Image (cartoon, rainbow, N blue to C red):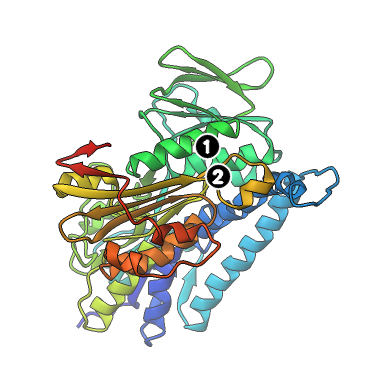
Amino acid sequence: MTEYDYDFFVIGGGSGGVRAGRLVAGMGKRVGIAEEYRWGGTCVIRGCVPKKLMVYASHFSSEFKAAKGFGWTTGEAAFDWKTLIANKDKEISRLEGLYRKGLENNEADIFDSRAELRGAHEIYLKSLDKTVTAEKILIAVGGTPNRDALVEGSDLCITSDEVFHLEELPESIIIAGGGYIAVEFACIFAGLGSKVKLIYRGEEILRGFDGDLREALHEEMEAKGIEVICGDVFAAISKDDSGKIAAKTRKGKELVADVIMLAIGRNPQTEGLGLEAAGVGTDGKGNILVDAYSRTSVEHIWAVGDVTNRVSLTPVAIHESMCLVETVFRDNPTSPDHELIPTAVFSQPEIGTVGMSEEDAAKDYPALDIYRARFRPMKNTLSGSDERMMMKIVVDNASDRVLGVHILGPDAGEMAQTLGIALKMGATKADFDRTMAVHPTAAEELVTMYAPSYRVIDGVRQED
């Protein structure tokens, strides 16, 4: 019988990798885990967590304005970028320490090193110039921003990796992309006082989300002074004589700003990882191919999280890791459930959504009842803000089952988490209707829309 250095070795110290390593080490197994950058991965270090802190910071400009309508007299407000970044860095360091401590407390061996596969059971630790062996291996290295290398001058741009470490708040910024990251940072910088342009190749921002939601957010972003350019992309990027970054688009636009940020997707961090040496299969873009239980083409190697290109969300990576532990170490085969995942976009206004969009539901269901409301939330009546909320419920006419709920407005993400439970349990519109409203709240609209706004029959809206 071959003796390995470790029962289980994890490559990648993000949320998914750390969760698996900690749980398996807590079972008394010999566990090694390696991370080449910082513990916590993209989400904790340069993703969800620092971004949400910056979202909070960007809200205060509108809150100060709103306060006057409620009788508050406020002095002149001033924002200091360096203070925000320093406080953000302090919190991220604290969280990183907790990730390390969790592994240490369960007696996992921690390696601050890049790790590469040198064979089916061999892992090379670059900083130590040492190879270790493991019976079972998990790859959880995540992704990295797409830097659009095919566009001339793209090296002059920043990505979400660098945006958290800018020395100064830019007076102007152009953001390329139309997904979560692009939309969220456009709203962050606008809220902090920057002049913002967003350019996206598609017809409308947030591809894959409900169409009404996308259009409503676009409208609200422009109302906040963000210029949204759809259907265009960069052709070339350069630095002008004043030191600003200039971009020419394929449609002939010339855009200039202090900073250009690329938020055009992410690529798996599999280059140079040694997958070929271990026999691990990938798709044409470098994503690791896995089965329903996160097993790769090699029987004793698994992969979770963004590197597998299933659903690129932190809670999903954690869920996949917990399922792997059940399957591999507790003899309880458990396949990750990727259906009805609630999600939020921390734009301004915020989006919270769970389930199918109207467009997707119309492809699978012959008749839909759509309940939709667009209204000004109570807070805005005194604040003077014209910002409006939107709530939309997509229902299968035949079964009355709620297929999707989509919200644009304050605390939409918080609502989506609770709604996710209801939809996961198979809630019907009748269940919503017999639920008592919490008054006065914006959320009560979800249980007081009794008549459909319109129906969709065979994919076509039946407007009155």
Residue 49 shown left or right of residue 463 in the figure: right
Residue nearest the viewer, comparing 6 with 195: 195
Q: Is residue 302 above or below residue 238?
A: below
Disc 2 is placed on an element classified as loop
Q: Residue at x 66, y 56 (%)?
A: 88
Check disc 2: other Cα within 10 Å, few if <14, some if 14-19, many if 20+.
Answer: many
Q: CA distance from mark 2 to mark 1?
A: 8 Å
Q: Amino acid at mark 2?
A: Gln
Q: Residue at x 48, y 55 (%)?
A: 412
Q: Which quadrant would the N terminus be assigned to in this image?
A: bottom left
Residue 211 in the image: state x and y as whole percent. 34, 39
Q: Residue at x 23, y 74 (%)?
A: 334
Horizontal and vertical percent position of residue 59:
65, 48
- Residue type at mark 1 is Glu
| Foreground: disc 2 or disc 1 | 1
Residue under circle 1?
Answer: 220
To which residue does mark 2 refer? Answer: 348
Q: Is residue 300 visible?
A: yes
Q: Is residue 172 left or right of residue 232?
A: right
Please, what secondary structure does the residue beneath circle 1 have?
helix
Q: Is residue 191 left or right of residue 348?
A: right
Give the camera-side residue of 371 and 406: 371
Measured as percent of width and height from the top left, residue 201 is found at 38, 27
As drawn, the label of residue 184 is none
Residue 428 is situated, as x and y percent measured from the top left of the image, at: 26, 64
Q: Quadrant of residue 398?
A: bottom left
